[in-house]
C-alpha cells in the first residue's frame, strides 16, 4: 500500500458558527484516485477548501507528507466549480494556464522556456489551439472548463483536485478527460468531487461519501448495500462499459438532500440510464 500524502484527523469545520463537517478522518495516498460524492450542501466543497488551505479548521489536524516525511504544504492543482469563476475578469486563455505555474511569477513575464513549452503542450492537450489569446469571457462553457483544467495540470502538482470537472464539457472531451486523468494518476494523486456516481465508480480507486460526516470505502467496486446505506440511494447494479448504466430500485425521496443519484433524466429513454447527454 502506498504512503499517505494527506491526512485529516478528527476534523470539524464550518461557516459563520454553523458546523458543516464533524469528526472527519481521511487519508489520501500517493497515486490515489479518490472520488468524493454526497448530497448538495453535505460538505464536499468544504472538504476541498480545507485541503487547499482556503478554510480554517474549527478543530482537528491536517498533515501533508512527501516521500514519507511531513511537510508544510503540497503543490496542488485545483479546478474549481464552474460557477465560482468570474468571467468578466480580463484575462486570456493562455494567461489563465500560465497562472497555474507559480504564484511567484508575474503574468507579464519571467517564465522559463521549459514552462512556456509546458503551457503550449497543455493548450494542445486541452484542444485550445487558436484561441490562446481569447478572453475567458468570450469562451463557451466547455472551452472555459478545459482552460481551467489546463491550469490545474500545467505545474505537474503533487495532487490534482477537480470539483465537478464534467460541467459544460461535451461527451467527446469527457472521454478524453478521463483518459488524461488516468495518465496523470500514474504519477500523482487525484481528488475528484462529483455528483455523477456512474462516472465516479468507473474511474476512481476509492470513494468518500460526505454528508456532514465522512464514510470511506477503499474499494471503488462498492456493493449495492454499501451504496444504499451511505448515499441513501437504492442502487441495485452498476454495470461497466463505454457508457455507465445504473439499474435502480424505487427511489425514496424522504431522506432529504438532492444527491442527483437515481433521478432519471425526464428526456432520457426508459433504459435504466439516468445519465444526461451534455
Image (spheres, helix red, strand yellow):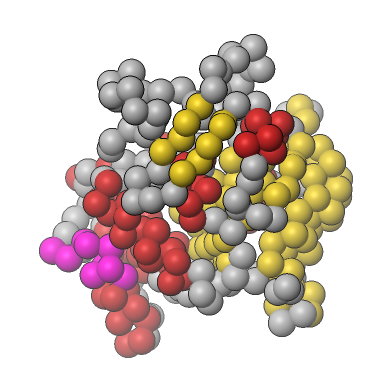
Residues drawn in magenta: 122-130
Q: Nearer the viewer, residue 191 or 65?
A: 191
Query: What residue is shown at x 64% (from left), y 42% (from top)?
Result: 223
Q: Nearer the viewer, residue 106 or 23?
A: 23
Return the residue found at the far bottom.
113
Which percent across, then down, holds residue 264?
Answer: 41, 23
The relative height of residue 158 versus residue 50 in the rendered view (above or below) is below
Query: What residue is shown at x 66% (from left), y 17% (from top)?
Result: 255
Return the residue found at the far top.
254
Q: How many marks?
A: 0
The relative height of residue 127 versus residue 46 in the rendered view (above or below) is below
Q: Quadrant of residue 59?
A: top right
Question: Dividing the image into 4 quarters, which one contains the C terminus?
Answer: top left
Query: What residue is shown at x 22% (from left), y 47% (from top)?
Result: 139
Query: What residue is shown at x 78% (from left), y 31% (from top)?
Result: 19
Residue 41: in sight, yes or no?
no
Amino acid at each position: 500500500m502506498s504512503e499517505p500524502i494527506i491526512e485529516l484527523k478528527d476534523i470539524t469545520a464550518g461557516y459563520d458558527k454553523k458546523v458543516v463537517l464533524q469528526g472527519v478522518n481521511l487519508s489520501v495516498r500517493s497515486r490515489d484516485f479518490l472520488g468524493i460524492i454526497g448530497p448538495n450542501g453535505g460538505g464536499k466543497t468544504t472538504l476541498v477548501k480545507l485541503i487547499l488551505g482556503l478554510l480554517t479548521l474549527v478543530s482537528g489536524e491536517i498533515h501533508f507528507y512527501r516521500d514519507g516525511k511531513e511537510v508544510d504544504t503540497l503543490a496542488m492543482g485545483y479546478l474549481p466549480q464552474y460557477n465560482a469563476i468570474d468571467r468578466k475578469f480580463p484575462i486570456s486563455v493562455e494567461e489563465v494556464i500560465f497562472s497555474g505555474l507559480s504564484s511567484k511569477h508575474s503574468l507579464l513575464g519571467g517564465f522559463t522556456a521549459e514552462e512556456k513549452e509546458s503551457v503550449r503542450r497543455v493548450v494542445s492537450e486541452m484542444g485550445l489551439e487558436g484561441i490562446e489569446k481569447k478572453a475567458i469571457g468570450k469562451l463557451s462553457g466547455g472551452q472555459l472548463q478545459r482552460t481551467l483544467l489546463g491550469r490545474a495540470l500545467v505545474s505537474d502538482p503533487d495532487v490534482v483536485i477537480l470539483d465537478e470537472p464534467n460541467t459544460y464539457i461535451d461527451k467527446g472531451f469527457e472521454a478524453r478527460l478521463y483518459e488524461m486523468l488516468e495518465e496523470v494518476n500514474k504519477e500523482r494523486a487525484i481528488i475528484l468531487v462529483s455528483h455523477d456516481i456512474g462516472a465516479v465508480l468507473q474511474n476512481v480507486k476509492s470513494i468518500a461519501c460526505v454528508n456532514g460526516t465522512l464514510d470511506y470505502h477503499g474499494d471503488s467496486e462498492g456493493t449495492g448495500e454499501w451504496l444504499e446505506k451511505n448515499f441513501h440511494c437504492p442502487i441495485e447494479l452498476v454495470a461497466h462499459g463505454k457508457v455507465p448504466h445504473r439499474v435502480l430500485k424505487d427511489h425514496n425521496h424522504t431522506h432529504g438532500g438532492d444527491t442527483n443519484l437515481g433521478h432519471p433524466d425526464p428526456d432520457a429513454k426508459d433504459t435504466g440510464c439516468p445519465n444526461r447527454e451534455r
